[in-house]
């Protein structure tokens, strides 16, 4: 049973090849390359995913390289930290590891269930996400030991086999019940509701493996990794699927796919949707502008920037107003993180990785509004224009409802403000870069 992940990942080539985004440790630049092969986010249109993805609410990016070579767009997070005196070597390496995995995605693999996908190592990808954020906040001289936590995942599978060997001779239903009893009773894994009370350690795989408390997406990932190992070892002789719960409290459960119902279909988590869920949970948990659960993250940031029509807003509580005011005040003082009101570093890193995943063009808009609050007006305008160009070229149009209309109105106001700022005579980038609070 040794070297489980090596056996699995050995089926796919893994060398680092610069693709959509170039990562250069020497120039400390994360850029959207403008070459015909490397520039996926230069000038691109969106179409819906493959036919098998009818339940997906995202778009799949279909890119066309028409962007001018001089107009490269760059991710800013690592460069800003570097200019502030923070060593980003480990963060950049983790980002490269993340990209080295997701660049293996084909259109079909993006829509493959997490219980059978083998093209992308989802466990390792989740640990690269954790490793980057750990480096951003800890400034440790030692990177997060990704391989050690991969071994912990493997140990779960081996331990289950040693304790429950008789389950492989029983019915599929009994095997899955034994596996869930092993995970949720014997090992004590439990679910945390990350939306109501965001708990950072429930959002990172290494912490979940350590503390055994995690989000539904993390528990589903661990469940799927065990199923994949059992299938690799020839111990799983039926088509197992994972039921991903959309309510706040239920645990991920396995079932025999041949006996599934049509109502189970929306609860199948694909490889792409799992990574999107993991990153959006992080984005939500660390978003620096928290208002209420009925307002989108973008609107909360636009509201803090006075880019929304407050006269049409519902009555806001003192806590909600204090949240927006506190977030703006912290940024003006150069403090980018707060215990109660988010962490700009990790919100930016989540946005950048969601853009790399190429699933939803609204991530460009959300990244833009964060850059605006950080004082990077030129880059904010570039990403906002890219969002509008992509939206206009999209086959899948945005739904027209009250909140969508509010969001688009805020986009227009933000666009006007950014253009006015950049048109001001004598405007220049601030000489001192806002520092990240430790």
Image (cartoon, rainbow, N blue to C red):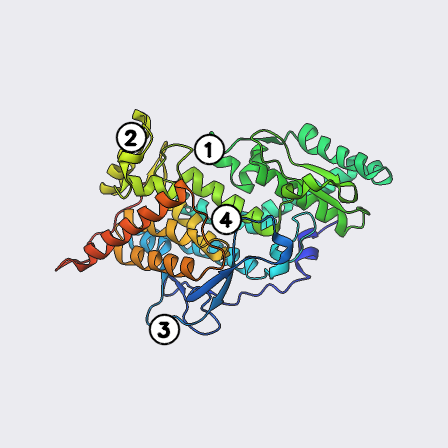
Q: CA distance from mark 3 to mark 2?
A: 43 Å
Q: Is residue 126 left or right of residue 232?
A: left
Residue 374 in view, yes or no: no
Residue at mark 1 = 198
Characterize the local packing of mark 1: few (<14), some (14-19) or many (20 or more) Cα atoms within 10 angstroms.
Answer: some
367 relative to 113 in the view: left or right? left
Residue 25 visible from this viewpoint: yes
Whichever of callouts 3 and 4 sits on the residue coming sooner in the sequence is 3
> Residue 7: x percent and y percent?
70, 56
**Which label lies toward us, 4 or 2?**
2
Query: How far across and how far down the image is residue 124, in percent?
Result: 58, 51
Tell me the mark number nearer the camera, choosing from 3 and 1: 3
First in sequence: mark 1 or mark 4? 4
Q: CA distance from mark 4 to mark 2?
A: 32 Å
Please say if the residues under marks 3 and 2 sit with CB atoms less than 8 Å apart. no
Which residue is farthest right? 169
Q: Earlier in the sequence, mark 4 or mark 2?
A: 4
Viewer-proximal residue among 145 and 46:
46
Query: Separation of disc 1 and disc 4 at Cα?
Result: 17 Å
Tell me the number on the disc at residue 245: none
Q: Residue 33 location in percent, x, y?
A: 41, 68
- 71 or 393, which lies in front? 393
Which numbered disc flags the more N-terminal residue, 3 or 2?
3
Q: Residue at x 80, y 50 (%)?
A: 234
Q: Quadrant of the C terminus?
A: top left
Between 290 and 7, the residue placed more toward the observer is: 290
- Mark 4 — residue? 129
Secondary structure state at the residue bearing disc 1: loop
Relative to 347, 423 lies left or right: left
Residue that mark 2 sits on: 321
| Whether residue 177 is situated above or below residue 408 in the rendered picture | above
């Amino acid at each position: 049973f040794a070297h489980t992940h090596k056996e699995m990942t050995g089926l796919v080539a893994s060398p680092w090849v610069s693709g959509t985004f170039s990562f250069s440790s020497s120039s400390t630049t994360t850029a959207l390359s403008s070459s015909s092969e490397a520039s996926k986010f230069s000038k691109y249109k969106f179409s819906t995913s493959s036919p098998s993805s009818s339940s997906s609410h995202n778009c799949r990016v279909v890119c066309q390289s028409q962007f001018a070579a001089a107009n490269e767009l760059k991710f800013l997070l690592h460069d800003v930290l570097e200019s502030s005196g923070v060593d980003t070597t480990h963060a950049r390496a983790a980002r490269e590891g993340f990209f080295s995995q997701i660049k293996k995605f084909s259109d079909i693999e993006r829509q493959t269930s997490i219980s059978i996908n083998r093209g992308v190592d989802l466990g390792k990808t989740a640990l690269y996400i954790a490793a980057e954020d750990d480096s951003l906040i800890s400034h440790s001289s030692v990177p997060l030991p990704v391989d050690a936590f991969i071994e912990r995942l493997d140990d779960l599978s081996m331990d289950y086999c040693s304790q429950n060997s008789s389950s492989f001779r029983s019915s599929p239903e009994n095997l899955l019940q034994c596996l869930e009893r092993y995970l949720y009773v014997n090992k004590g894994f439990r679910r945390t509701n990350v939306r109501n009370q965001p708990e950072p350690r429930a959002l990172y795989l290494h912490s979940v493996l350590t503390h055994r408390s995690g989000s539904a997406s993390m528990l589903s990932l661990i469940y799927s990794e065990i199923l994949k190992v059992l299938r690799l070892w020839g111990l799983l002789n039926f088509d197992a699927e994972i039921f991903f719960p959309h309510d706040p409290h239920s645990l991920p459960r396995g079932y025999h796919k041949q006996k599934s119902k049509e109502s189970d279909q929306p609860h199948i988590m694909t490889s792409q949707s799992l990574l999107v869920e993991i990153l959006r949970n992080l984005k939500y948990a660390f978003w620096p502008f928290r208002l209420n659960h009925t307002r989108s993250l973008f609107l909360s940031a636009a509201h803090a920037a006075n880019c929304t029509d407050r006269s049409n807003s519902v009555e806001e509580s003192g806590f909600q107003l204090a949240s927006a005011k506190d977030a703006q005040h912290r940024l003006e003082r150069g403090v980018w993180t707060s215990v109660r009101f988010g962490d700009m570093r990790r919100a930016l890193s989540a946005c950048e990785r969601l853009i790399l995943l190429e699933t939803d063009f609204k991530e460009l808009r959300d990244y833009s509004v964060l850059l605006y609050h950080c004082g990077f007006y030129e880059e904010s305008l570039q990403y906002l224009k890219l969002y509008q160009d992509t939206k206009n070229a999209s086959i899948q149009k945005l739904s027209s409802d009250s909140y969508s209309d509010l969001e688009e109105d805020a986009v227009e106001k933000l666009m006007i403000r950014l253009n006015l700022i950049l048109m001001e005579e004598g405007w220049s980038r601030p000489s001192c870069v806002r520092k990240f609070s430790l």
